[in-house]
Amino acid sequence: MKESDIFIEVDCFQKNKAGNIVCGDSYMSQKLKEEDRIISVLSDGLGSGIKASVLSTMTATMAMNYTAMNESILQTALSIIHTLPKDMVRKISYSTFCIFDIDCFGNTRIVEYESPAVYLFRRGQAVEIRKKKIPIEREDLENTFLWISEFKLEKEDRLICFSDGVSQSGMGSSNMPFGWDEGVGIYIAETLSQYPGISAKELARKIVLRAERNDNYRLLDDTSCCVIYRRTPRNLLICTGPPYDEKKDRYLAEKVRDFKGKKVLCGGTTATIISRELQLPLQVSMDITDKELPPLSYMEGIDLITEGILTLSKVERLLTQGIPEKSQGPANDLVNLIQNSDKITFIVGTRINVAHQDPNLPVELEIRRNVVKKIKYLLETKFLKDVEITYL
């Protein structure tokens, strides 16, 4: 039976080698809902730029597909090695990879090939991972090995892997002539001590940005970090639209009041219902932070109150395309709340809002339910969130 009070957060942060327009590292992650498994792969292709990107993308894709089909680890590795095109100069086909395969109970299998060693942090300290060494026979390289480990990932454990852009950052400098390899673990331990509840997303980001700093803010290689964090889920409730039957207004308000986690109201009518039923004053801000959207509102006990369909439509675009740097506004605030949550529950009212039937409004203003379904799909496939929709 699935442990409902446990969530596995997976995230990755990447930066390109200075001057490159693409990253030579590839990261992929997939949740197999039928099997309650999460598979994540990080691969580093030979060299940098487009050539490395092609190699790492091929490797990550094959590793993901073979692992999902429960193929033999050794056969998976050999298939990848024999499929990759050979470098014209070095005469080798080469791409490192690290594969994580974790089920809902925390049973974990890690496969590493020529990549920096994976870190396991338990109770804030690095713990040694017992590994099995398997030689790989190949014509173009000698003495290459797979490292396989199997163990139980406990609550609050973190797994951290990265490309050598992290471990070799700072190489040749006076304070780290051989790179940051030995210092990464110390930095992670210090960060966890200072921020015990730090998310996988933010920890990965901090590690990569520190590596960039080691290289005097001009990365000498493509740099990626993947973090897996098994912990108590962070819950988020998003209510949008009034209930079909006005008699359900009180029921909706009680659902919002009793929810354990962050709470968001999307829509003026929705916010007015909650304000009336719970007898909480609703204050509308006059500060416009996004010219495309109406300003925020505020109510005690509610973390975010925004306009409805316009905001949700922009949230869907931001989740698809990414948030531009230095952008702000209600949709950005909602995306940040979503990305920092694990289990997102939508309560979608089904009463038709006559304002959205105006034929002069933009075509992208789809029915609220369809917009929420798109967001659900993105959150489950792209961000590996647990999402539930209830219609009212």
Image (cartoon, rainbow, N blue to C red):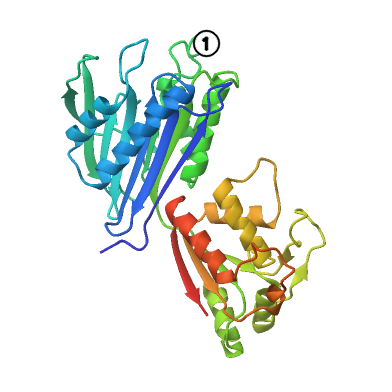
Q: Position of residue 26 (x, y in %)?
A: 42, 33
Q: Is residue 119 visible?
A: no
Residue located beneath label 1 in the image: 173
Q: Regarding mark 1 in the picture, which secondary structure is present there?
A: loop
**Residue 5 shown left or right of residue 188 in the figure:** left
> Is residue 281 or residue 91 the one in the foreground?
91
Instruction: Please identify the quarter of the rendering in which residue 86 is found.
Output: top left
Residue 390 in view in this figure: yes
Image location of residue 168, percent across then percent down: 44, 18
Q: Residue at x 41, y 23 (%)?
A: 164
In this picture, residue 3 sits left or right of residue 165: left
* Closest to the observer, 266 or 175: 266
Give 241 or 336, whichever is nearer the viewer. 241
User: Measured along the vertical axis of the image, is residue 109 above or below residue 300?
Assistant: above
Q: Which residue is depicted at the point 69% across and 79% down?
A: 354
How far from the left and from the top, in percent, is residue 157? Answer: 36, 45
* Amino acid carrying mark 1 in the image: Ser
Determine crowd level at label 1: few under 14, some 14-19, many 20+ residues with C-alpha closer than 10 A. few
Residue pictured at 17% horizontal, 20% vertical:
137
Examine the rendered structure and indicate whether residue 83 appears above or below residue 170: below
Going 49% across and 29% down the picture, which residue do you hit? 23
Farthest residue, direction right: 286
Picture layout, residue 351 above or below residue 71:
below
* Residue 213 sits in quarter: top right
Left or right? Give the position of 211 relative to 161.
right
